[in-house]
Image: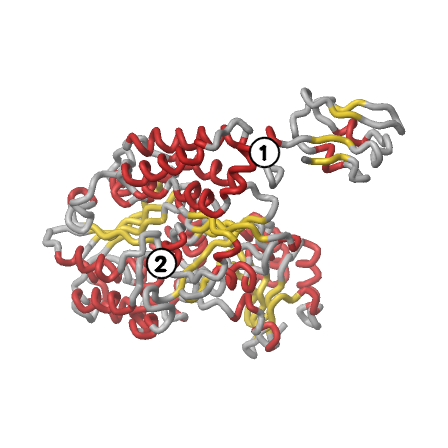
Amino acid sequence: MNNIKRIKVGMASCGLAAGAQEIYDILSADLGDKLEGTGCIGMCFREPLVEIEFTDGRNLTIGDVDPERARLLAEKLTTEIPEEWIIYDTASKEFAKQPYFSKQHKIALRNSGIINPESIEEYLEKDGYEGLKKALKMPGDDLCQLILDSGLRGRGGAGFPTGLKWKFARRSQNDQKYIICNADEGDPGAFMDRSLLEGDPHAVLEGMVIGGCAIGATMGYIYVRAEYPLAIERLEKALIQAREKGFIGKNIFGSGFDFDLEIKKGAGAFVCGEETALMHSIEGDRGMPTLKPPFPAESGLWGKPSNINNVETLANIPWIVFHGPEKYAAIGTEDSKGTKVFALTGKVKYSGTVEVPMGSTLREIIFDISGGIKNDKQFKAVQIGGPSGGCLPESLLDTVVEYKALNATGAIMGSGGMVVMDEETCMVDVAKYFLNFTVEESCGKCTFCRIGTRRMYEILDRITRGEGKMSDLDELEKLGHQVKNGSLCGLGQTAPNPVITSLKYFRDEYVAHIEGKKCPAGVCKELILFTIDEEKCTGCTLCARNCPVDAISGEVKKLHLIDQEACIKCGKCYDVCRFDAVIKE
């Protein structure tokens, strides 16, 4: 084992959920001095992951490590590791050519899964805080211009130019300014910010200190939801380490610049992702949005000029300052520079986080990088942009990932959640799911958001129960536009997007529910009919024995029947039948 430099176990939330702690404990018995934890490298679909770094520079990554394999691995480190265990080998050119690796470009995620997130020394080895050292020597105006020249736009959803946002805050004259990190990630299926905070907390801290230096802020807040305990724990450790090293505190590196940070835990209200609601929550008030202007750059937290950026935006900042704006601006498209992190989930084969250059297509992300659809089923749609995003069909898979192109489809970039759906997904049910989410998460301040989204949900619910009317489709579109135009904040303004886009691209499914009283995907229970084929039924009684409500009757070796009034449409009979005798219509 003299040729082994170190062994890393993925200890982010995804890895721990898959059993990484047990793997770590098993390996530590023999390899404790060379073993350490790391963040998520993106391959959530293969957790628990173990990476072996050799002294000659070679790296091996092993996936799906269970306790038995962990014990065998400790033994085989002195010999050859079985090839079938290995999912990535830097010594093999074939591995490097895999689209999952070759089509990504990691800047925000540059250290996640690479370094020990609880070690500032390892962050420093990766040029950590070099961007801050450079920034401290620059005038604030020049620093703002540098970020503007890079083309970086806010990765929280709206895509506003980050450098311009910083300039507005810098121009505001006041005795106190604040910089805030929005880590209140609440989109269903989104885990980009969590992965970043768990895998590379110092990158976010460094980005905040640079931002404070640029706008003249001396205090920062990281607003992170309390449901992210591991992210909070690693942020707290990183804060202590950064203070001890002098990267945060008084007179940083003799520059005369003072800056401190505090972590604020959010209670999980989705509306607190909106910047004014977030600031009210930090102040101790109820998280509700307020009308702009004034904008936060003029009057934000406690009435002082404030700048808010999300986690991914801030993680890019140190890299841009250290390497220069030109290098970042050379990546992406004319409208959208740099890279974007996405959380891939749903019916995709390789779920996890990916970071791609702007200008990549949805097809490349879903099929090349993430392996396509599970069980090789037919792709139906991708919901991009979180609950406020749009549902896009197969015909739009060649849409490029950039702000203008995605907005033109009716979807939005959002913070980076991407939910992939297959042929067995009902688009009416999907729209209902996301509307229910926004109904529950609305703060209730705006009438159109509070009542309009609920009326939309009620219409969708009727349609999925087979009680819809064709006039409901016009009503949904009318209400959708009224909610968008009559709501104060981004939650209400974008809440109707899943409905509007699914109506635009999957209208035939709505019509089938209303006119045919059928759910083409077989999802909406009230529209499903289970029957038994008399020619295929062998009378094995398996269906009857598994029915939870005793809705199936029949004797052994004789035809069985389903009582339609008693049937609860659970589908258990359909799942257990070995002879395809149960028909689902």
Nearest-to-viewer mark from 1 and 2:
1
Helix or strand or loop: what does disc 1 sit on? loop
**Can you identify the residue that label 1 sits on?**
516
Quadrant of the snapshot with the N terminus: bottom right
Colour option used: secondary structure
Residue 71, image x, y percentages: 69, 58
Quadrant, the C terminus: top right
Name of the residue lying farthest toward the top: 565
Residue occupying the point 39% across, 47% down:
185
Using the image, tell me which numbered label, if any, was put on residue 403. 2
Q: Amino acid under label 2? A: Tyr
Going by the numbered disc 1, the residue's amino acid type is Gly
Q: How crowded is mark 2: few (under 14 residues within 10 Å), some or many (20 or more)?
A: many
- The structure residue drawn at horizontal position 32% and vertical position 37%, both measured from the top left corner, is 483
Q: Residue furthest right?
A: 557
Q: Is residue 193 left or right of residue 38?
A: left
Q: Distance between the residues labelled 1 and 2?
A: 38 Å
* Residue 313 falls left or right of residue 63: left
In the image: residue 566, left or right of residue 456:
right
